[in-house]
Image (spheres, rainbow, N blue to C red):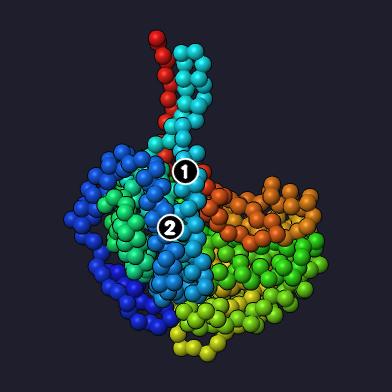
């Protein structure tokens, strides 16, 4: 990554598609001032108008989804079919908040009797800084920005430096949809510039999706300047399979859950905790599926696995696997193809992972399956919870008592039973422990950046 500026380098072709320099202090100030002006104007924009603009945005996304998906695939290596689904999901989210926002943002009556009226209103905070990652370059941004803007806020967005074309395209889409100038602005800034922005009194809050390290840094700054914050950080989600499960289905979805976005997803299943009674069957089934994988150009619709987004990330993953093997883990299976492109890494299945292995508590951001064998649900739960992370989880069992057991005791922001973990517009999304705090999506996400204002009126007459 070029520390002097912004670069879009295709992880597959290795071609440089775009270069830019980071904003200087004057450019940052211009955007802060423009955002502040827009924030004041946004207070006077009706919810009906915001809903109409969201529908405009939805239509633009749907109309141009093929080109937008190609941009995602070229810039960060995601297989094209997944990229199309990502754009479609953003369009659906626009429509979702058009339908739900009026009800959820309406004032809540607490008491209305005699001369006393008490209610709660949900009002915008103002200018919100978003810091978003590269792995879902459209969805992560929309997941944060849409509810914030629908609630009446204004967004400044620092995107990852390796997806600048996606960053610029999103800003262009908001402009084309008719949003007021300054409602959504892109920021090409360095990490060191974040503190200056959070220190500014015009900025009221920050939302970050990224690594645990980035979350700690931003949380410290937000605390220093007393700014509201939402953090969605790493994950090492367990995928638990019990004897009563449909093992074939659990194997099919295990492969999908691990390999989404070439394995580069915070909510990808990463630790596969399999009951000993179905362990051999499940392992055999996933091997059969992995043998069918096709590596290659993410623009090829038949390709399942593209390159990792950056070479340094691929190097880090290879180092983690090597260190794990040196510490006693065994490579049960490995799938790859001949290539000189260092952004590609093998799809690996690791077993015999002990608690003293370095990867036991790490997040592996790429197509590596960590597989564990357990003998009962208590052992499965203990292993699943023995992690610094607590984002999502997936449990496969037909036993209702087991379902309730895992739902109640798993330490995670989400529990999905007999399906893979996925973000969904209608459900609050976020984690606990080192996976962060706060919620996105659903009603909770719409109100995260609201001033929940208590109103009490004594009608003296």
> Residue drawn at (32%, 52%), measured in percent from left and top?
179
Circle 2 — which element? Answer: helix
Q: Nearer the viewer, residue 176 or 18?
A: 176
Q: Nearer the viewer, residue 355 or 30?
A: 30
Taking 60 as reference, is 294 left or right? right
Taking 423 as reference, is 16 left or right? left
Residue picked out by circle 1:
101
Q: Local crowd at mark 1 within 10 Å, few (<14), some, or many (≥20)? A: many
Picture quarter containing residue 336?
bottom right
> Residue drawn at (39%, 57%), measured in percent from left and top?
57
Circle 1 — which element? Answer: helix
Q: Local crowd at mark 2 within 10 Å, few (<14), some, or many (≥20)? A: many
Any mark on residue 442, and which? none
> Residue drawn at (63%, 62%), measured in percent from left and top?
420
Any mark on residue 58, and which? 2
Residue 145 in view here: no
> Residue drawn at (55%, 87%), measured in percent from left and top?
337
Given the current orientation, which residue lies at the most extreme top position? 461
Measured as percent of width and height from the top left, residue 143 is found at 46, 55
Earlier along the polypeptide chain: callout 2 or callout 1? 2
Report the Cα–Cα distance between label 2 and label 1. Answer: 15 Å
- Which quadrant would the C terminus be assigned to in this image? top left
Vertical arrangement, residue 295 with respect to residue 129, above or below: below
- Which quadrant would the N terminus be assigned to in this image? bottom left
Picture quarter containing residue 142?
bottom left
């Amino acid at each position: 990554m070029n520390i002097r500026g912004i670069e879009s380098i295709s992880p597959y072709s290795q071609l440089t598609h775009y270069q830019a320099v980071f904003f200087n202090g004057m450019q940052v100030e211009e955007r802060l001032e423009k955002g502040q002006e827009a924030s004041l104007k946004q207070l006077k924009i009706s919810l009906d108008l915001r809903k109409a603009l969201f529908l405009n945005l939805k239509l633009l996304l749907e109309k141009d989804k093929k080109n937008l998906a190609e941009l995602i695939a070229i810039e960060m290596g995601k297989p094209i079919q997944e990229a199309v689904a990502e754009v479609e999901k953003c369009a659906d989210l626009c429509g979702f908040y058009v339908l739900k926002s009026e009800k959820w943002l309406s004032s809540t009556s607490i008491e209305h009797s005699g001369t006393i009226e008490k209610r709660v209103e949900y009002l915008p905070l103002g200018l919100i800084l978003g810091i978003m990652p590269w792995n879902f370059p459209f969805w992560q941004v929309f997941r944060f920005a849409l509810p914030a803007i629908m609630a009446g806020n204004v967004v400044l967005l620092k995107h990852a430096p390796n997806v600048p074309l996606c960053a610029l395209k999103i800003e262009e889409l908001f402009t084309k949809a008719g949003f007021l100038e300054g409602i959504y602005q892109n920021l090409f800034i360095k990490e060191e510039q974040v503190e200056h922005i959070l220190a500014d009194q015009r900025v009221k809050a920050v939302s970050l999706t990224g690594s645990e390290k980035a979350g700690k840094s931003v949380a410290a700054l937000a605390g220093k300047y007393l700014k509201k914050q939402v953090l969605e950080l790493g994950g090492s989600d367990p995928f638990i399979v019990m004897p009563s499960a449909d093992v074939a289905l659990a194997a099919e979805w295990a492969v999908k859950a691990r390999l989404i976005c070439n394995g580069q997803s915070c909510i990808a299943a990463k630790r596969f905790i399999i009951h000993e009674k179905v362990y051999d069957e499940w392992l055999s089934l996933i091997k059969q599926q992995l043998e069918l994988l096709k590596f290659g150009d993410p623009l090829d619709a038949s390709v399942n696995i593209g390159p990792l987004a950056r070479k340094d990330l691929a190097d880090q993953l290879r180092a983690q696997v090597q260190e794990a093997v040196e510490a006693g883990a065994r490579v049960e299976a490995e799938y790859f193809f001949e290539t000189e492109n260092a952004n590609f890494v093998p799809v690996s299945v690791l077993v015999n992972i002990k608690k003293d292995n370095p990867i036991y508590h790490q997040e592996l951001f790429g197509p590596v399956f960590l597989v564990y064998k357990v003998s009962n649900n208590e052992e499965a739960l203990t292993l699943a919870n023995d992690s610094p992370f607590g984002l999502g989880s997936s449990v496969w069992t037909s036993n209702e008592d087991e379902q309730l057991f895992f739902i109640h005791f798993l330490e995670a922001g989400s529990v999905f039973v007999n399906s893979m973990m996925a973000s969904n517009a209608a459900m609050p999304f976020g984690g606990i422990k080192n996976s962060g705090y706060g919620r996105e999506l659903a009603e909770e996400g719409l109100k995260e950046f609201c001033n929940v204002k208590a109103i009490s009126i004594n009608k003296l007459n």
